[in-house]
Amino acid sequence: MKKKVFAILLCGLPLMINAQDAFDVLQMSQTELRGTSRFQSMAGAFGALGGDLSVLTQNPGGIGVYRTSDVGISMGVDINSTKAGTEKTNDTKFNVNNVGYIGAIRLDSEAVPNLNFGFTYNRLKSFNRRYVGGVGNISTSMSNFIADQFVNNNPKGPFTDEDLYWTNDFNPYDGYAPWAAVTTFDMETDNGGYVGIINANNGFMQGLYGEGTRGDAYYEVIESGHADEYNIAFGGNFANKVYWGLDFGILDLDYTSRQRYEENLIDPYIMADDEDLYESDITNVNTEANWYLHNYLHSKGTGVNFKFGLIWRPIQQLRIGAAFHTPTFYDMRDTYSVSARLKAYHGSDLLYRADKRSDDGYFTYTLSTPWHFLGSIAGVIGRSGIISLDYEYVANQTMRIGDDRRNNYPDVTYNVKDYFKPTHIIRVGGEYRVNPNWSLRAGYSYQSTQVKEGVDKYDYNIATVGTNPTYQYDNSVHHITCGVGYHYKSFYTDLAYVHKIRNSVYNAFSPINDEYGYEPNVSADVIDHNNRVSFTLGVRF
């Protein structure tokens, strides 16, 4: 009877099981080097230069540098190669990176020579990436992590199997219900019984991996989508010394993730008899198991932000810039589903095949990205050369997620502060004018890690919500850039090449690190090599 009651309760599970955690907020807050080809070819080091359609997303003070109107479009092709372990995948995408218009209004005044306004579209981020890999001779199982979370890492004390009957009464953000455990417990078999990837054993929970167990794991991650920004800006200058700009951004975010994790285990600890879940013994004698967990997530939202920037030109040869960006305040809606499957064998005999699937669930919430602060300096060398340096501080610890009324979830706020540290971005770029028509450009940028050392060294038990224990982050991002520009009368065209190296870490689940010692998780280094060719056409008049 208990099993029938629990199966009925599972009908309401999709309404509650998923919501965003700290690492999901991090993923959706990231931007990358995109924009006009000139901007990209100098690695985005434009904070003290201005005069480019991309500056509205960076330092809007650059709009004040314009003396004439400008309209342009930038397109590009991305060839991405991603390697996880020994497996490599390739993908090619076409993107429109920037479309914009700047209107210059000349005033008959030495104090305020001009006022400018502008409208631009910028692709801030392409999420497109796929990687697959395998880990042999794993030393633990995701099922052990789920069982450990179920028993040892709940603020309200250890769970027993009895507690699962009422988990639908709780919010995933209160830290009470381990939703991955709900998903993988009490799965219905093909012969009408109930088993689980984690199992009740003497009132507590047992994972599949134990003494004498061995096996391997396989993972696949498919990400797609974009973050786009539409800018409305206004600015000008004072006495050709101080340039200023205000920017209002409207953002569109669309992100889809499909993640599959699978294990093949020899001599796992499985239910010896699936006819009675609560009285059966667990055995690992001459057994095998294959199981997978598949999570689907589609996040879509719109947001707004505000930027303010200044550029000061104390002398002709020197420019100094500063800007700040408020968080982007998103209203989000998630669509998600989860499925799990377990096949258990005793010798050559199939004991059972068990499945659990959810219908599509929906969740609405609010999200705010980090504050950004920028400082820049640039030097003009005669009439032929420019060299520019930018520094950007990204306050990852200020990210927040909350309900529809923007009441922050306290557990996620705590985790954001506990896991993340500020990211530092350094950009350097240069331009040399060969003659009045042709220019050569090059640049380099570096972005530091987003996580604290404890996360990188696996000293933390990482909390995730919903049904997906997986998390990932970037350790470093490098851009090596170059390009060429041609200008004739009012017409200009630019070509850029950007090589991006992104070093990430994939974790199938958190390491089990408790009072009994460290137990490593299943993880892999993921390296992206992205080659982009960008082309811009524009007219100034």
Image (spheres, rainbow, N blue to C red):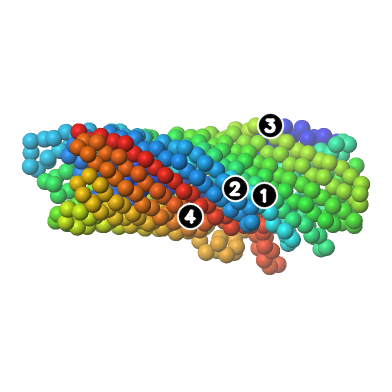
Residue at position x 59%, y 58% in the image: 525
Q: Label 4: state its secondary structure.
A: strand
- How crowded pointer 2 is (Cα within 10 Å; few <14, some 14-19, many 20+) is rated as some
- Return the mark for residue 501: 4
Of callouts 1 and 4, which one flags the residue occurring earlier in the amino acid sequence?
1
User: Which label's residue is closer to the chain start, 3 or 1?
Assistant: 1
Residue 138: % across, % down: 73, 59
Q: Nearer the viewer, mark 1 or mark 2?
A: 2
Apparent side of residue 275 relative to residue 57 in the rendered image (left or right) = right
Q: Earlier in the sequence, mark 1 or mark 2?
A: 2
Q: Nearer the viewer's eye, disc 1 or disc 4?
A: 4
Which badge, 2 or 3, is on the more N-terminal residue? 2
Residue located 57% across and 65% down the image: 457
Q: Residue at image x 40%, y 48%?
A: 497
Which mark, by number, is residue 219?
1
Of labels 3 and 4, earlier in sequence is 3
Instruction: Give the number of the mark in front: 3 or 4.
Output: 4
Q: Say which mark, if any, is on residue 450.
A: none
Question: Mark 2 = which residue?
Answer: 89
Residue topped by disc 3: 359
Residue type at mark 3: give it: Asp
Disc 3 secondary structure class: loop
Question: In the rendered structure, are the residues bearing label 1 and label 2 in contact, judged by CB atoms less than 8 Å apart?
Answer: no
- Quick check: can you spot residue 151? no
